Amino acid sequence: MSELHVIAVSNRKGGTGKTTVSVNLAAELAARGRRVLLVDLDTQGHCAVGVGLAVSRTEAAVHRLFMDPDARLSDLIKETAYPNLAIAPADQRFEHGSGDRDERRLARALAEDEIAQRFDIVILDTPPSLDNLLLNALNAANWLLVPYIPHHLSFEGVRQLMRVLFKVKSDSNPGLKILGFLPTTAAENIRLHRTVTNEVGRQFGAIRVLSGIRNDIRLAEAFMAGKPIRHYAPTCRGAQDFSDLTEHFLPTLS
């Protein structure tokens, strides 16, 4: 059995494109034959919106793991309309700071035999807040992908996340590695964008800075349509950027 790759998509600053990256990376990997589970830890619940899945308030959601010690992740998964892509949706009623304080609850849930048998890759969309949900994601993951908008506040979110990362690596998950820093809504012709991205590279390693996801209104339209960008506007630049990003990751995630 091949290794289960678990990718946490995270930034301590909100509005950096974490959900857009999570949904579209998951869809691209699934289209290439990888069996992907998208786990939405952000109680806004936008991952389900991005794949066109309506989740009622009474349906089981991934946050049940943190309320019920007997809950099984395999029972909280729903299929999407897209082959190879399933989702464990969020509970929009879950209150941050409530529930089990065990920071390894998600790691144990992902260790279920059925998860490794059904999936090759798990993508965790995380909340920006420093709470038990984010710590569970970082303790469960073996890869960390950090989207950021190339401006000062988003860069501060990256720096704050790195402080959390180093503590998690030191205390509980030494195998967690950085998959890359991903600029979103990127525009090389904007001086501030170049300056911030250069600073990310200087502080955390230029080799870890990925080619960006360019600003594209079609990415927002795709969420309104309930479709990943490859299925909504496959020839737009946003779709091309996510396709290129996925091709870049494939050797690492094989």
Image (cartoon, rainbow, N blue to C red):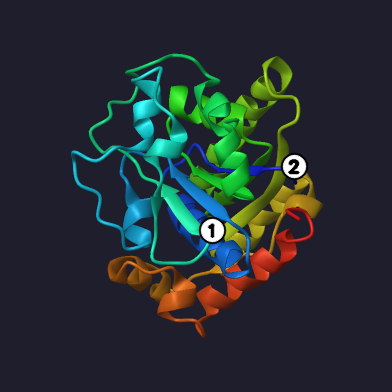
Mark 1 and mark 2: Cα distance apart in space? 25 Å
Q: Nearer the viewer, residue 47 or 78?
A: 78
Secondary structure category for the residue under label 2: helix
Label 1 neighbourhood size at 10 Å, few (<14), some (14-19), many (20+)? Answer: many
**Residue 91 in the image: x percent, y percent?**
29, 37
Which image quadrant for residue 127? top left
Q: Quadrant of the N terminus?
A: top right
Q: Nearer the viewer, residue 215 or 62?
A: 62
Amino acid beneath label 1? Ala
Q: Quadrant of the C terminus?
A: bottom right
Which image quadrant for residue 131? top left
Label 2 neighbourhood size at 10 Å, few (<14), some (14-19), many (20+)? Answer: some
Residue 125 numbered tag: none
The residue pinned by badge 1 equals 26
Amino acid beneath label 2? Phe
The residue pinned by badge 2 equals 204
Asked if residue 110 can be seen in this view, the reply is yes
Asked if residue 131 can be seen in this view, the reply is no
Q: Nearer the viewer, residue 195 or 173?
A: 173
Which residue: 45% across, 67% down?
Answer: 82
Q: Is residue 120 above or below residue 210?
A: above
Q: Nearer the viewer, residue 155 or 183?
A: 183
Left or right of residue 213, residue 172 in this image: right
**Residue 110 in the image: x percent, y percent?**
56, 33
